[in-house]
Image (tube, rainbow, N blue to C red):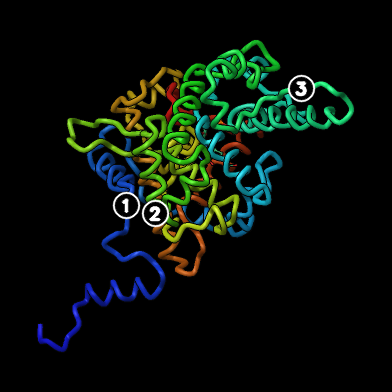
Amino acid sequence: MSDDEADPELLALLRQHLQGKPPINNDPETGVLESAEYVYNNSIDVALDMRASKAAATAIYSQMQQKAYSPATWSEHDLHPKAEGGPDTVAFIFTMDLLNFCFWSELSEEKRFAIEYRGKRWTGYWSLVAALQRALDEVYLKFRRLIIFIFYIKGIPITDPHFWQNEDEFTLNVLRNVFRSCTDEEIPLLKERLDCLREAGNVLYDKYKCHPVNLIAAADGSAARLVNLLARDFSCFRDEHGFDGRKKPIRLLKRAQILVADLWACFEGEDFGDFWDIDKITMFADYRVPQMLNSMGCLLYSPPLDSAIRSKKNIPSGSNWELQLRACSIWCVELIRREILTEHPEAEINAILIDFFLYDTIKEMELNGQDKILHHRTRSIWY
Ligand SMILES: Nc1nc2c(c(CN[C@H]3C=C[C@H](O)[C@@H]3O)cn2[C@@H]2O[C@H](COP(=O)(O)O)[C@@H](O)[C@H]2O)c(=O)[nH]1
């Protein structure tokens, strides 16, 4: 290269710097997409149907346009906290995504675990949000009554890491009361949920001045860096698994990623939701979106796996089948995202919004009794 030609790498660094973004070589990656592609390339029980995925991209894009899907859609859900709450909303979302796992039940709709709140019966993910809101309401209502009464009524500060650390006050029975059901079934994995809160309380106290806003600050505006901090510092967010003897763990990091996505959506990309690399976040590998992708013909199962899912067999957490289901779902949504942006380069769409749309759609289908295709059944704290 002659002396007067600028080094392209330096030029790119300069451009990044001028745009106010960290230099390229500091760009953090989460490793989730790389993991998903590796598992997809080495899967024998789950495959993707390219023709169906292409058709799904067209259908998803047009329906998302019709429904004007955007980060603002998140706050339209009655139970979700609002951006006006600032740090209290951050604390709520952190608590919610710390516990955002494993709600499926073997029992009927009438007998499954459910939370009664604001005159309605909430199940699944919404039972979690309702239980947290109810605990805070109880605190709020009690303070209101305080003005009338002279004695102090202590509620349950369920989003406060100081409380999570207090083994005398915050016991399994207290958490059982937060998640008290209007049926005879208890929330799945209650003890594991207490362990997650306890660990998170200790880590936030030790490293982040006991509030998740300081964790967001440490990520310095990067979504990927925040995901990596969560996976590094909290074992209960470290959703990593061995696969086929590969040296590097397969990183799926579902709850770390959905936490970042929920912050981004709730604050609509501003304030505590402002991440310059938000599009690095992938689909969240749970049990609902694979179900939706399978019902659209995008995700195909081998006969043994298909039969296991249809006969509601438990598929162990970290098993080969389970990793194929989760990772191929991430890769499928990535291909759908690329297809949409190829057809519509101007579309303001990312894997998060596609995922939110697919989740909400399968929930609507379930409500209308259309969810004939079953989801896989794994009990774990990862999703
Ligand atoms: N991939 C993906 N997984 C999601 C969600 C959500 C809720 N997100 C809300 C926020 C914005 C969206 O618009 C939604 O309104 C929960 N889950 C997961 O599903 C499971 C619960 O299922 P069920 O028992 O049927 O409620 C459980 O693993 C939970 O972690 C999502 O969005 N994407």
The disc labelled 3 sits on which kind of residue?
Ile
Q: Does residue 61 appear left or right of residue 281 in this picture?
A: right
On-image quarter of the N terminus:
bottom left
Q: Are marks 2 and 1 in contact (CB under 8 Å)?
A: yes
Q: Residue 29 got which mark? A: 1
- In this view, the residue in front, 351 or 362, is 351
Q: Does residue 48 appear left or right of residue 376 in this picture?
A: left
Q: Residue 153 got which mark? A: 3
Q: CA distance from mark 2 to mark 1?
A: 8 Å
Taking the spot 39% from the left edge, 33% from the top edge, the residue there is 234
Label 2 crowding class (10 Å Cα cut-off): few <14, some 14-19, many 20+? many
Q: CA distance from mark 3 to mark 2?
A: 45 Å
Taking the spot 64% from the left edge, 26% from the top edge, the residue there is 123
34 lies above or below 235: below
Position in image of residue 21 (x %, y %): 39, 67
The residue that mark 2 highlights is: 280
Direction bottom: furthest residue: 4
Front label number (2 vs 1): 1
The disc labelled 2 sits on which kind of residue?
Lys
Position in image of residue 116 (x %, y %): 73, 24
Position in image of residue 168 (x %, y %): 56, 15
The disc labelled 1 sits on which kind of residue?
Glu
Taking the spot 35% from the left edge, 71% from the top edge, the residue there is 16
Between discs 2 and 1, the one toward the N terminus: 1
Front label number (3 vs 1): 3
